[in-house]
Image (tube, grey):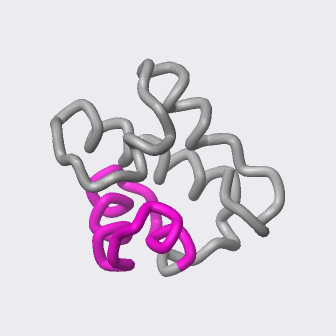
Amino acid sequence: GLPGHGVVRGDAEVARERGISLAEMRGQRGTKELISARWEAMKRIRAERPDLNSACIARYFHREGSTIRHAWRSLSVVA
């Protein structure tokens, strides 16, 4: 989960379901499989913790805040 932000399990659940590690999901590789898993994790984290902003989640995933907002818009999650 996100360090220092209480219990957030969406990322670990997605990693386990997809058979990948959290490090792979948070890493820089951009295979279709990893991007899909990353976006799903971002969606679950947003649902689980709507109080976390895109900048916080971006830091966790080593991305820009605009990338997180783009994922949320693409997945029909309110940014």
**Residue at x-position 80% and y-position 51%:** 7
Q: Main secondary structure of the magenta part?
A: helix
Q: Residue furthest left?
A: 31
Q: How many marks?
A: 0
**Residue at x-position 56% and y-position 42%:** 11
**Which of the two residues, 67 or 4, is positioned nearer the viewer here?**
4
Q: Residue furthest right?
A: 6
Left or right: 35, with 49 as reference point: left
Quadrant of image for the C terminus: bottom left
Q: Is residue 1 above or below residue 68?
A: above
**Which of the two residues, 38 or 24, is positioned nearer the viewer here?**
24
Left or right: 75, with 2 as reference point: left
Q: Where residue 4 sits: x, y (%)? A: 78, 68
Q: Is residue 65 above or below residue 27?
A: below
Left or right: 39, with 10 as reference point: left
**Residue at x-position 45% and y-position 71%:** 58
**Which of the two residues, 49 or 20, is positioned nearer the viewer here?**
20
Q: Where residue 14 sits: x, y (%)? A: 51, 31
Which residues, given as a range, are shown in magenta?
56-79
Q: Is residue 20 above or below residue 23?
A: above
Residue 39 covered by magenta stretch: no
Q: Is residue 12 above or below residue 68?
A: above
Q: Quadrant of residue 61?
A: bottom left
